[in-house]
Structure formats: structure tokens, C-alpha cells
Amino acid sequence: MTTAENAPSPADAVVPDTKDWTWVLERPCPDCGLDTPGVVATDVAAMVRANADRWLAVLAGDEEELRRRPSPGVWSDLEYACHVRDVFRLFLVRLNLMLDQEDPLFANWDQDETAVAERYGEQRPQAVAGELAEAAEALAAGFEAVAAGQWQRTGNRSDGARFTVESFARYLIHDPVHHLYDVTGERV
């Protein structure tokens, strides 16, 4: 099959996720099992690398299966992997803003719009694997470079959510862990 044959139709559009996921900073996630409040921010770099390794294993699967959506309106494994890659990239930008500026405001990011615009379901799994690994390593290195006095620096999301670098690290790690659960069904 060509990628055009695998592309979802407009009827298969993913229902946008409008949930405010900042609640994961206050209690464990009942779905994926990650106890985000218990995550130590200085452990996040290693957690990002370990999570990326698991995504690389997913992306080594059959390309046709990676493109298949489990049901209309739900991302395929490949689309989830593209999202995680882009989350790693975006969070590195935001981490650097928090470290370089006083109390920055993060530009809004519409993950669903990005998935459509970037044609996540049509990307090549091998290329996504390389990009995801690169983005994960850059983000992990970014968190490793945070100095002891920088963990309480702040940044704000456009919806009013406020983070310290420490809470931002814990918030970040839930996303790729949760999406790995979405794909594999395996809880942490």
C-alpha cells in the first residue's frame, strides 16, 4: 500500500483532546499508572531515554500495522510516535525558554492541528525513529544541564497553567509514558 492509501479520511479525524492534563501533577494517572507526583525531576532525563528506547521498539514493527488506526478517530502507533517526537522537541524549546528568560509565556501548540498539517500517518517509521531518538537525547541532555538553582524557574502556558522547571519535567514525562500505554496497553 502507498501512504496515500493509508491516509485517514476526514471521517477518521481524531477528536481533539481538550482535557487539562495538569492534574497529573497532583495524583497518579489511573490509566498508564505513572505516579507523576512521585517522579524526581532529576530522574526525568533517564526516564526520557528509557521511554524513547521503547518507542524505537514500537517503530521497528510492521509498517502497515504502524499506520493502522485501532478505530476511527484514534491515532495509529505511528501517529502517536510522531506526536511524542514533537513533544520532546517542543519541551526542549520550552525548557530553554524557562532557563533563558524570566517567566516566559509559551506559544500555544495545537497537537491535533500539527498531526494533520505534518501528515503524521504518512511519515516513514524509520525516519520518525531517528528523529524521536535525536529529540529524546537532546531533551534528556537539556534536563541534565539544569543547575540546582534553576529547578524553581518558572514558565506559563497560554491557557494559564504555570510551571516550575521541576513541575514541568514531571508533567512532561507523563505524556510519552501515557502514549506508550495508549499504544502497548502496558502500565508502568
Image (cartoon, rainbow, N blue to C red):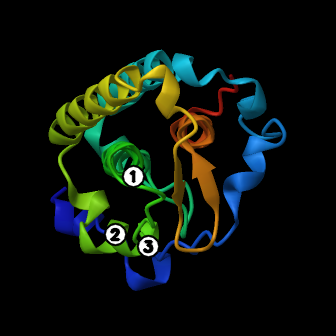
* Quadrant in the rendering for residue 73: bottom right
Instruction: Pick whichever of labels 2 and 1 is earlier in the sequence.
Output: 1
Of circles 1 and 3, which is in front?
3
Q: Amino acid at mark 1?
A: His
Instruction: Pick whichever of labels 3 and 2 is earlier in the sequence.
Output: 3
What residue appears at the point 37 percent right and 79 percent down from the top-left corner? 9
Where in the figure is residue 94, as x and y percent of width and height? 38, 52
Q: Amino acid at mark 2?
A: Thr
Where in the figure is residue 36, as x and y percent of width and height? 71, 33
Res. 98 in view: yes
SS state under label 1: helix
Could you say which disc has been placed on residue 108 in the image? 3
Where in the figure is residue 46, as x and y percent of width and height? 45, 15
Q: 28 or 103, which is in the foreground?
A: 103
Picture layout, residue 177 above or below residue 101: above
Q: Which residue is mark 2?
A: 114
What residue appears at the point 51 percent right and 71 percent down from the top-left corner? 14
Q: Quadrant of the N terminus?
A: bottom left
Q: Which residue is mark 1?
A: 83
SS state under label 3: loop
